[in-house]
Image: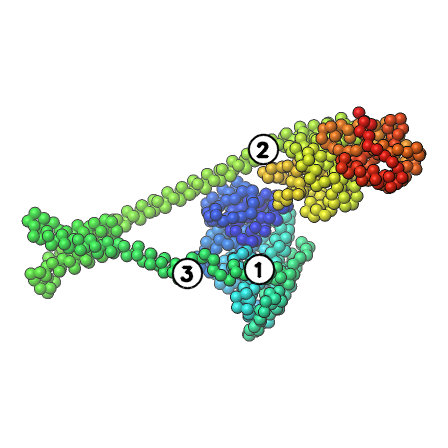
Amino acid sequence: MVVLLTGGSSVLMNALIDKLNKNGHRVYLLTGQRDRRVTYKRVFERYDFACDSNSVKDIVESIRPDVTVFTGAYDTNYDWELSAREESVRYLAGLVNVLSACSMAKSGRFLYLSSEEVFGNTYAENIREEEPAEPKGFRALALAQGEETCANYRRTQGTDAAVVRLDHLYWVPKKGEQEDNPCFRMCLEGLKTGKISAGSNHTLSLLYLSDAVELIYKLICAEAPAHALYHISSMEPVTELALAEMIRDEADCGVEMTDVTVGMNSRLVLDSSRYDEEFPHRIFHDCRDGVRQVMRYMKKHSASFLTEEDQGVGAAVRTWKYAREIFWLLVPFLESTVLFFLAFFLNGIAADSEFIARLDIYLLYVLLLSVVHGQQQAVYSALLATAGYCFGQMQGRTGFEVLLDYNTYVWMAHLFIVGLTVGYLKDQLRFMRNEHRSKVGYLSGQLKDIEEINDSNVRMKHNFEEQVVNHKESLGKIYEISSTLEQYGPEEVLFYAAQVLSRLMDSPDVAVYTVANGDYARLFSATSPEARRLGNSIKYTAMEDMYGELKARRVYVNREMEENMPMMACAVYAEDDMQLILMVWSLPWQRMTLGEANRLMVVGHLIQNAVVHANRYLEALRNRRYVEGTNVLDEEAFTHLAKAFSDARDKGLAEYMLLEILTEENYESVAAVLGKAIRQTDYLGLLRGGRLYALLPNTGPKYIGDIISRFQNCGYECRVDEEAVI
């Protein structure tokens, strides 16, 4: 399944990505911002564009996701505290843009995540989906309008849009980050002040993150949900006072409680009965368990939550920032003032000069400031020039005479007309230049977006081409494995299955384990010492991650890169019983894909067919292969078996030891005694004219001494015979 997630980096986003990756889905991410410094978990492709970008349409058409998840109420790209009104406009624009792109592309289901915030009143009973939303505040109103938008698209455009309301979602916070949920706020208050203020008249229900992700995932994978709106809630009502008591108990550091109960009762608990009926589930984290995890983490890293870490809001930093802004605002006025004194000085000199007496210095001064800075400085410089002109005229006349002089006003009008006209033209040119620069920047951004989308499409194209090529190649290899395994004898199938598996998976380190009983598996063959890392015997049921996948008949993929685990593994079943475990050890990260996992699954089924065929053949010949009444192979059958082990050891696929039992007793009595001293994977048989031998697979010289001692304790002497099979 192809899933497109939209939203900023958050604990919820990372949890969704992790859940989808673990289940083998291909995840694309639209981050909603162009900041590549923000980290996310591993996704198939990441697009750093705003949700209201024109490129979203191209992205959706390129991906064509089966499901699009809009994180909505939990999108960290929006700062609701700074400017809720402007953010609500940007939020709805982004939602409509993404939703319309999905609707036009007919790209599967659209899932919108909302919250309990759309209900602003108090309710006596649990809130069902039929209850109309009553938002209070810009953020809640934006979330409710988002729900209405999804409903309109579903009704008018036929878009498969669904809304999910999560009830008081909370989680273990990241180190040093501030969160907005009741549990975090109370824990932080307790750590800061040693007191928690809570009331017994406010009732709510908390939903832990991992439970929410699991329930959202069920909706993502659902083929056809019956409804367009679901509530997801733990439906575990708890008062603020009870929540504070849990936090106090878990804090264990003298935190006190303050009962601030006042006013009427307030209750806000979502009813998730509709979801429970359609998707049966179980809540794994109750309120106390979730509070315990949050409080323990915050207490352990309390320093990061209680101190400001490099936020740039100190008094000195703010003062310097404001001073710098004010300085750059005053620079043009300072420049105009300095140039005015220079013009005043030059005007005084020009008055005494016969050559430049007719030159109007003040007009040139105003004209220069108008050309450089525009209308604002044109007015300011004209006022300074007027003051300078009047001061110069008052050298031989009184100020009253200057004010009554008609020429003074004509000159002032001349000065202001020229200054304002030139300043207006300058402002217009600046506006046109900025608009042109903005347009060029926008088109450049669009071109960059197209280039990035094209690069992404090229990478996906190459990836798909490689998958197609590998798939075509694997068809030939499938025929190769089926024909290759058929040419070996029944005793040799498992040895060469490891060799063929190594060639098919293009990995030099492959191991085949046979399941000896319900808990343990024995190494049968391996292609290298690296593939023998786990040893000759493993308790595979103790390897929880791998066992869970094998039990579900899926391919185990070591996505966490655990050192002592294979990169991939799958199990071979005979009906309902696990028979073999195939392990691939050396596999590069870029090849740990769904295509490779499918290839291993196919190879496992082919090996299963060959093994079952060989076992049925041997079972059919059982009466002819064993000495009558014993579990001792006759000489012909045992010779073939020993020869197969000898050839496999020469090719580095297996190791074994051959012991001759030194006895004159009949085979039936010896086999009855030694049958209890050997393993399920060991063999007894006849060689060299009827002598009794024991073949011990995956046994080296350093372990043979213990086995010889075990046989001696049973009353039989034995010796190692390396020349029995040639």
Q: Nearer the viewer, residue 606 or 189?
A: 189
Q: Is residue 280 above or below residue 628?
A: below
Q: Is residue 338 above or below residue 449?
A: below
Viewer-nearest of discs 3 and 2: 3
Few, some or many residues within 10 Å of mark 2 (<14, 14–19, 20+): few
Q: Residue at x 63, y 48 (%)?
A: 221
Query: Which residue is the site of mark 3?
Result: 314
- Say left or right for 102 vs 274: left
Q: Residue at x 28, y 57 (%)?
A: 330
Residue type (three-letter) at the residue carrying disc 1: Lys
Disc marking residue 466: 2
Give coordinates of residue 199: x percent, y percent. 57, 71
Q: Quadrant of the C terminus?
A: top right
Give coordinates of residue 83: x percent, y percent. 44, 59
Give coordinates of residue 269: x percent, y percent. 61, 64
Q: Quadrant of residue 677?
A: top right
Residue type (three-letter) at the residue carrying disc 3: Gly
Viewer-nearest of discs 1 and 2: 1
Q: Residue at x 47, y 58 (%)?
A: 309
Disc marking residue 328: none
Give coordinates of residue 223: x percent, y percent. 64, 47
Q: Earlier in the sequence, mark 1 or mark 2?
A: 1
- Say left or right for 403 vs 582: left
- Say left or right for 429 vs 73: left
Q: Earlier in the sequence, mark 3 or mark 2?
A: 3
Q: Quadrant of the N terminus?
A: top right
Cα separation, mark 3 vs mark 2, equals 54 Å
As helix, strand or loop, the secondary structure at mark 1 comes to: helix
Q: Nearer the viewer, residue 680 or 276?
A: 680
As helix, strand or loop, the secondary structure at mark 2 comes to: helix
Q: Quadrant of residue 386?
A: bottom left
Disc marking residue 300: 1
